[in-house]
């Protein structure tokens, strides 16, 4: 890097870096510093070629644990999907401004490797002419969505935090989670989810939401935004204008939200308004249609009335707007992959996330500028927002991380203890007939743990039945695990019933129970044995509506280790259940009737 350019980058980053570490300047000084910084950032933009500007707008996936030497299978995947061999070639070819990490792309094996990958990406980018640091992002929501697993600290997810209701806990989870991401070189987290889950049938949000009360969700979103950003990581509230009331997953279809404008303002808007008021660094769009906000039939990601008219102008937001993945069906339903990125920029987007074909998307934006459909000034406005964020996060000044920094921050005992204590405040007890819970080691020493073992998120060390049985055993019970799956066969159910004969109590993990599903049959047949049955919903808390006869029922909101350990503590009576439902549970045979309202939760 030339000395003059290093000096310029340091100057443009200086004021923002001071703010990031706390004790920064006053609001008036912030405004002056921002204006001063903009001049330096605009000078950087003025030196970019058009091709470099186009690249800065993209955030792209890339396979491999290393920026230059990934495994052969990852090289093959990169060549097939992107036309490059590795992250370094991706940067050299397209000059992307951002890269997103995924576990399935083999980016997140362990903390030191993640740090090395991040450093390799930064080195490759800064080595380019007029090279700039890359903004590295991931989806670390915690709960059921976590791209970075153990030994990093994994916290309860959003709905579990909603059951706690504690803004302090939400902020602490964000601050610690953010500090660990930053230590590994990840400076933008696509969290927290700001959707209000008012539809129990929502297939894509559910427990990723803090709950169904817009004002409660707004408070927790604001708290978590402040937590992440106090750690020097950009938080991202999603999915604007609100993905909470749908029965269609936008990964696979095109959801339509039928809220009126007044309903949107009451139900969907408050968490995003709170995020903006909290100084949110970035907001992610939703691939949904909201006819009341834009009758054109376009998804919100491509809607100028929604992104510019509402988000920019009405809500007054001038931070970074990032699309949800452009490979999702919801944004590809109406337009081709060459039109989607152009229309997103025209709508008001700044970052184009993970297009299915980067070549098609990149060339489409380039051609749109060359043809006059997009102006270079329009690109400059988005690049300025992105560079402002990079400066604020200290990337222009200190883009690299160290192994020693990882060791000081990631998965340290204090962080792990905080996660356990927070989880213990989230477990929710809805049924406790005849005060079955807590189980006594004297009267119920032998416990059979059966039930659903869904695919494990990053926050698990094994199947939920195994983790829960191990936790109960560590608390003095003799617990045996038997996985019956999410759709147990008649033979599997018979095996579980036979095993229950040797147990003093049965704990059954449930996962999205339906009226006609075999999980419900499993629970009914276990109840018929006469043994005490404790049901533990390991995802959505709505399962209780399908299980009216269980002796005790707990909601954990996820099957990650931290929440299963907390459930074991409650079952054993080591901690009292303190969680309160953040969503209502309707009667299975009459959804108009509420079985358990928001705020319901027993203790003992």
Image (tube, rainbow, N blue to C red):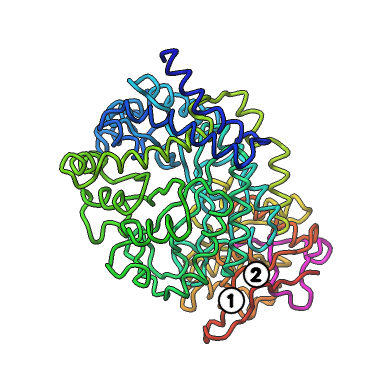
Where residue 90 sits, quadrant-wise, is top left
Return the residue nearer the eye: 48 or 494.
48
Q: Is residue 602 magenta?
A: no
Q: Which residue is mark 1?
A: 585
**Residues under labels 1 and 2: Cα distance?**
8 Å
Q: Determine whether label 1 and label 2 are within 8 Å by CB.
A: yes
Outermost residue, left side? 371
Picture mark count: 2
Residue 531 in sight here: no
Residue 439 in sight here: yes
Mark number for residue 69? Answer: none
Estimate how packed mark 2 is, as few (under 14), some (14 to 19) or many (20 or more) residues with alpha carbons within 10 Å. many
The C terminus is located in which quarter? bottom right
Residue 211 on image: x %, y %: 58, 66
The N terminus is located in which quarter? top left
Residue 255 on image: x %, y %: 35, 67
Report the side of 554 relative to 75 (left or right). Answer: right
Q: Which residue is mark 2?
A: 581
Q: Is residue 440 magenta?
A: yes
Where residue 184 sits, quadrant-wise, is top right
Q: Which residues are magenta?
A: 426-450
Residue 261 vertical placement versus 285 (above, below):
below
């Amino acid at each position: 890097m030339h000395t003059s350019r290093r000096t310029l980058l340091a100057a443009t980053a200086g004021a923002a870096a001071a703010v990031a570490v706390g004790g920064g300047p006053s609001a008036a000084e912030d405004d002056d510093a921002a204006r001063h910084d903009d001049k330096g950032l605009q000078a950087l933009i003025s030196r970019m070629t058009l091709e470099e500007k186009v690249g800065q707008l993209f955030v792209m996936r890339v396979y491999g644990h290393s920026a230059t030497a990934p495994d052969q299978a990852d090289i093959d995947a990169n060549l097939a999907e992107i036309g490059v061999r590795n992250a370094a070639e991706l940067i050299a070819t397209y000059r992307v401004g951002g890269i997103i990490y995924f576990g399935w792309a083999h980016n997140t094996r362990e903390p030191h490797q993640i740090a090395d990958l991040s450093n390799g990406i930064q080195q490759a980018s800064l080595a380019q002419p007029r090279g700039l640091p890359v903004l590295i992002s991931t989806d670390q929501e915690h709960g059921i969505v976590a791209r970075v697993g153990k030994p990093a600290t994994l916290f309860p997810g959003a709905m579990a935090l909603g059951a706690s209701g504690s803004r302090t806990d939400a902020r602490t989870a964000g601050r610690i989670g953010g500090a660990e991401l930053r230590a590994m070189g990840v400076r933008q987290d696509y969290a927290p989810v700001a959707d209000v889950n008012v539809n129990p049938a929502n297939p894509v949000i559910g427990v990723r939401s803090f709950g169904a009360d817009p004002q409660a969700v707004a408070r927790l979103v604001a708290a978590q935004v402040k937590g992440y950003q106090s750690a020097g990581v950009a938080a991202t509230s999603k999915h604007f204008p609100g993905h909470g009331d749908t029965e269609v997953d936008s990964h696979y279809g095109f959801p339509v939200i039928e809220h009126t404008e007044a309903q949107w303002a009451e139900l969907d808007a408050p968490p995003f308004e709170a995020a903006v008021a909290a100084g949110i660094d970035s907001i992610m769009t939703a691939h949904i249609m909201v006819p009341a906000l834009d009758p054109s039939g376009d998804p919100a990601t491509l809607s100028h009335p929604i992104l510019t008219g509402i988000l920019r102008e009405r809500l007054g937001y001038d931070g970074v707007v990032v699309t949800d993945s452009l490979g999702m069906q919801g944004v590809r339903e109406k337009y081709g992959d060459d039109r989607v990125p152009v229309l997103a920029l025209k709508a008001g987007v700044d970052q184009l996330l993970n297009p299915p074909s980067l070549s098609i998307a990149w060339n489409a934006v380039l051609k749109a500028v060359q043809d006059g459909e997009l102006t270079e000034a329009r690109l400059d406005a988005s690049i300025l927002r992105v560079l402002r964020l990079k400066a604020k996060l200290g990337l222009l000044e200190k883009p690299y991380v160290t192994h020693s920094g990882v060791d000081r921050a990631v998965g340290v005992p204090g962080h792990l203890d905080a996660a356990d204590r927070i989880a213990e405040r989230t477990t929710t007890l809805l049924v406790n007939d005849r005060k079955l819970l807590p189980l006594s080691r004297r009267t119920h020493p032998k416990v059979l743990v059966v039930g659903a073992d869904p695919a494990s998120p990053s926050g698990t060390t094994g199947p939920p039945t195994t983790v829960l049985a191990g936790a109960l055993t560590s608390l003095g019970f003799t617990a045996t695990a038997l996985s019956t799956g999410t759709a147990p066969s008649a033979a599997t159910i018979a095996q579980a019933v036979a095993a229950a004969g040797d147990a003093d109590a049965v704990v059954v993990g449930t996962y999205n129970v339906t009226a006609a599903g075999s999980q419900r049959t499993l629970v009914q047949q276990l109840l018929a044995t006469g043994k005490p049955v404790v049901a533990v919903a390991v995802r959505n808390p709505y399962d209780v509506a399908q299980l009216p006869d269980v002796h005790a029922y707990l909601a954990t909101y996820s099957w990650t280790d931290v929440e299963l350990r907390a459930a074991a503590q409650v079952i054993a009576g080591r901690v009292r259940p303190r969680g309160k439902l953040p969503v209502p549970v309707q009667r299975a045979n009459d959804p108009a009737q509420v079985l358990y309202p928001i705020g319901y939760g027993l203790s003992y």
